[in-house]
């Protein structure tokens, strides 16, 4: 007999889990289907086997007290008391084989002369290079801010839409400005998945979706089939393009037009006594200028007594694993024989481009009136909160009659 569900979510990253959470809180029975062997997708706190539980983030690493939808979910799950503040440690620039301060790359006169433009120019429709090149100065963009944006989006940043980064949102001032959880951000997807009222199935590779009446038929790679009344696709744009059912062809074409940047992440752990802080002072990470990696993110914001951990985010195809390890060790100033464990993780981020707002408006026009929701990091922006903002608005659209859940409180009105 073919299984039937009121609502199926394909993709168990934070976008899919968020959509499932919002739907379940409205009383909609929801099943999540995830291809991999764990939930979280790009939220992936890697626990090193050889390091007694020590973890380092292989993907997303920081949440902020301005992430209102995320904080709403953490409130629902009782996780707010567990939030662990991140210690303030500086980023360094990695340039010409040396670690340098960020200030060393600033051209102060150019900055002073350019800054007024930052406050009067509109960022809508502009790429990062055009907007910040004008507002911070071309040389400042080339030597510091361009590489810093590249480190954030892990791809060439120039044409990335300026309006999708650094949107100002109210902060919840009773909480740490930036935070993680005791076992890393991977605790968040796991807690969402573990709550009562949600069902999650792992190792479910969805290969086909078709419309059946007002609902959908979902086909798995192993030949399995199920049907549902409402469907949420919470997968990267290329995967969504392949799954959007016939009849919504323009939506599939639009999704197919969004590129995807591949990132080869190398996560490594080094004993603290082999990488002493006097040789490499605690750092948030490295912003690389013209190198085979875009950036490195360290675990130094939650220091461990025994270990230091780093995730190096490499350009695709630039180096093999052995050379990646050598490159990472060179940047850290430690011998490769000191590394106790490495793991390679394939990360992906959408390659959003100028004019993205129009593309999303057209996509939403295609979806209007259908029981299909699309969410992910390719609508509002790539941050965890951007994902959840999209997921929330899609669940408002799919299940309006059940929208009993209050909107997330305005964090700026939270008790001090
Ligand atoms: C290196 C890096 C650092 C980052 N740092 C931060 C940060 O500090 N703060 C922040 O806010 N954001 C950060 N981000 C961005 C943020 O982590 C991601 O944008 C977000 O986690 C993406 O979530 P998602 O659910 O949209 O997609 P994903 O995490 O990609 O999840 C999609 C899921 O769908 C599954 N899937 C795909 N196809 C199928 C299929 N056919 N059938 C079933 N399942 C399928 C995949 O296996 C995956 O689990 C970072 C991203 C990267 C890459």
Image (spheres, rainbow, N blue to C red):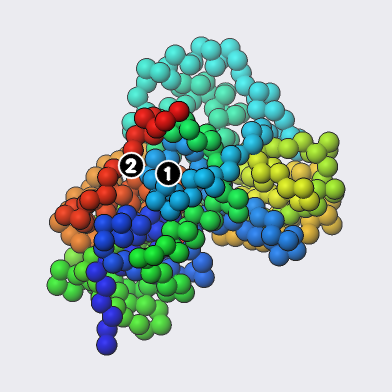
Identify which residue, 358 or 380, lies in the foreground: 380
The residue carrying pointer 1 sits among few (fewer than 14), some (14 to 19) or many (20 or more) residues within 10 Å by Cα, namely many
Quick one: label 2 or label 1, which is nearer the N terminus? 1
Q: Position of residue 310 (x, y in %)?
A: 68, 49
Please state, as top left, top right, bottom left or bottom right, where the C terminus lies in the image.
top left
Q: Residue at x 36, y 30 (%)?
A: 413
Q: Residue at x 15, y 68 (%)?
A: 214
Q: Residue at x 47, y 59 (%)?
A: 191
Identify which residue, 21 or 243, lies in the foreground: 21
Q: Measured along the vertical axis of the image, is residue 103 above or below residue 397?
A: above
Identify which residue, 200 or 347, lies in the foreground: 200
Q: What kind of element bears circle 2? A: loop
Q: Position of residue 219 (x, y in %)?
A: 32, 77
Q: What kind of element bears circle 1? A: helix
Identify which residue, 413 or 53, lies in the foreground: 413
Would you say the beta carbon of the disc 2 residue lies within 8 angstroms of ligand 1? Answer: no
Q: Measured along the vertical axis of the image, is residue 281 above or below residue 104?
A: below
Q: Position of residue 63 (x, y in %)?
A: 50, 42
Direction from residue 223 to residue 158 in the image, left or right? right
State yes or no: discs 2 and 1 in contact (Cβ < 8 Å). Answer: yes
Kindly give the residue lying farthest to the bottom in the view shown.
Answer: 1
Q: Position of residue 391 (x, y in %)?
A: 33, 52
Q: Quadrant of residue 371?
A: bottom left
Specify whether residue 273 is in view. yes
Please state, as top left, top right, bottom left or bottom right, where the N terminus lies in the image.
bottom left
Residue to which mark 2 is pinned: 408
Specify whether residue 162 is in view. no
Residue 71 shows which numbered tag? 1
Q: Quadrant of residue 151?
A: top right
Direction from residue 135 to residue 378 in the image, left or right? left
Q: Residue at x 40, y 18 (%)?
A: 119
Q: Quadrant of residue 303?
A: top right
């Amino acid at each position: 007999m073919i299984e039937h569900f009121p609502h199926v979510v394909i993709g168990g990253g934070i976008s899919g889990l968020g959509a499932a959470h919002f739907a379940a809180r409205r009383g909609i029975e929801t099943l999540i289907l995830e291809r991999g062997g764990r939930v979280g997708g790009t939220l992936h706190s890697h626990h090193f086997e050889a390091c007694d539980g020590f973890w380092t983030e292989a993907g997303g690493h920081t949440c902020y007290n301005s992430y209102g939808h995320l904080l709403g979910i953490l409130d629902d799950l009782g996780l707010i008391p567990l939030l662990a503040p991140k210690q303030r440690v500086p980023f360094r620039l990695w340039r010409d084989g040396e670690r340098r301060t960020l200030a060393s790359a600033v051209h102060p006169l150019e900055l002073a002369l350019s800054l007024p433009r930052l406050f009067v120019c509109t960022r809508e429709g502009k790429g990062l290079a055009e907007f910040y090149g004008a507002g911070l100065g071309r040389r400042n963009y080339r030597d510091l801010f361009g590489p810093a944006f590249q480190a954030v989006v892990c791809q060439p940043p120039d044409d990335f839409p300026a309006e999708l980064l650094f949107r100002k949102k109210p902060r919840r001032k009773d909480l740490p400005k930036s935070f993680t959880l005791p076992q890393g951000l991977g605790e968040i997807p796991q807690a969402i998945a573990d709550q009562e009222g949600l069902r999650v199935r792992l190792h479910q590779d969805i290969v086909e979706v078709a419309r059946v009446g007002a609902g959908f038929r979902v086909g798995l790679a192993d030949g399995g089939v199920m049907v549902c009344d409402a469907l949420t696709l919470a997968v990267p744009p290329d995967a969504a393009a392949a799954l959007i059912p016939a009849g919504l062809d323009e939506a599939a074409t639009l999704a197919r037009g969004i590129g995807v940047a591949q990132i080869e992440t190398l996560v490594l752990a080094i004993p603290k006594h082999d990488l002493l802080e006097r040789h490499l002072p605690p750092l948030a990470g490295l912003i690389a200028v013209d190198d085979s990696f875009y950036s490195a993110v360290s675990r130094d914001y939650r220091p461990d007594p025994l270990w230091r951990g780093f995730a190096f985010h490499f350009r695709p195809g630039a180096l093999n694993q052995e050379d990646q390890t050598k490159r990472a060790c060179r940047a850290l100033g430690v011998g490769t024989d000191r590394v106790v464990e490495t793991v390679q993780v394939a990360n992906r981020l959408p390659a959003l481009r100028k004019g993205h707002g129009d593309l999303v408006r057209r996509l939403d026009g295609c979806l209007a009136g259908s029981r299909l929701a699309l969410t992910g990091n390719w609508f509002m922006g790539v941050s965890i909160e951007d994902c959840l903002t999209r997921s929330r608005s899609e669940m408002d659209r799919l299940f309006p009659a059940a929208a009993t859940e209050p909107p997330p409180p305005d964090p700026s009105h939270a008790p001090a």
